[in-house]
Image (cartoon, rainbow, N blue to C red):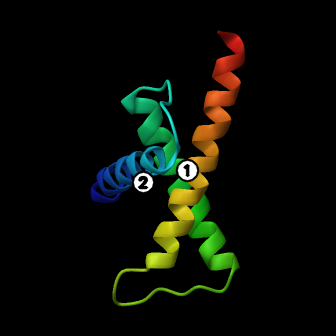
Amino acid sequence: MGEIIGTIIFGAVIGVLARLVLPGRQPMGWIITVVIGIAGALIGYWLWGALGGTDTSGIDWWRWVISIAAAAVLALGYTAITARRR
């Protein structure tokens, strides 16, 4: 249960940071932000492992950067898809 709550919190942080690095407003609510953040974090962790990154005893800054970048790309995709509907 703690892992699920931690993933949701981590996803929220990644999602908010991804939205901060994007220019302009993104028409999405906080639930979509958290979902995109979780997906970005999972993709970031996978990419980090695929690039040969390993767990460290401290903060893996590159893993965070990759996760935020992945979430930003997902947020751009989401806004592109939803903008066509409007």
Residue named by callout 1: 71
SS class, disc 1: helix
Q: Is residue 4 above or below residue 67?
A: above
Q: Quadrant of residue 70?
A: bottom right
Q: Is residue 69 above or below residue 15?
A: below
Residue occupying the point 57% across, 67% down: 66
**Badge 1, how many Cα within 10 Å: few under 14, some, many 20+?**
many
Quarter placement of the C terminus = top right
Q: Is residue 64 above or below residue 72?
A: below
Q: Amino acid at mark 2?
A: Ile
Q: Which mark is residue 51?
A: none
x, y percentage for residue 17? Answer: 41, 52
Nearer to us in this view, 7 or 79: 79
**Badge 2, how many Cα within 10 Å: few under 14, some, many 20+?**
many
Asked if residue 3 lies left or right of residue 39, the reply is left
Q: Quadrant of residue 51?
A: bottom right
x, y percentage for residue 36? Answer: 52, 42
Q: Amino acid at mark 1?
A: Ala
For marks 1 and 2, give the CA distance.
Answer: 7 Å
SS class, disc 2: helix
Q: Quadrant of residue 69?
A: bottom right
x, y percentage for residue 62? Answer: 51, 77
Marks 1,2: beta carbons within 8 A: yes
Furthest residue in direction front, as rendered: 24
Residue occupying the point 62% across, 44% down: 74
Q: Which mark is residue 14?
A: 2
Residue occupying the point 42% across, 41% down: 34
Nearer to us in this view, 72 or 33: 72
Q: Earlier in the sequence, mark 1 or mark 2?
A: 2
Q: Is residue 57 above or below residue 7?
A: below
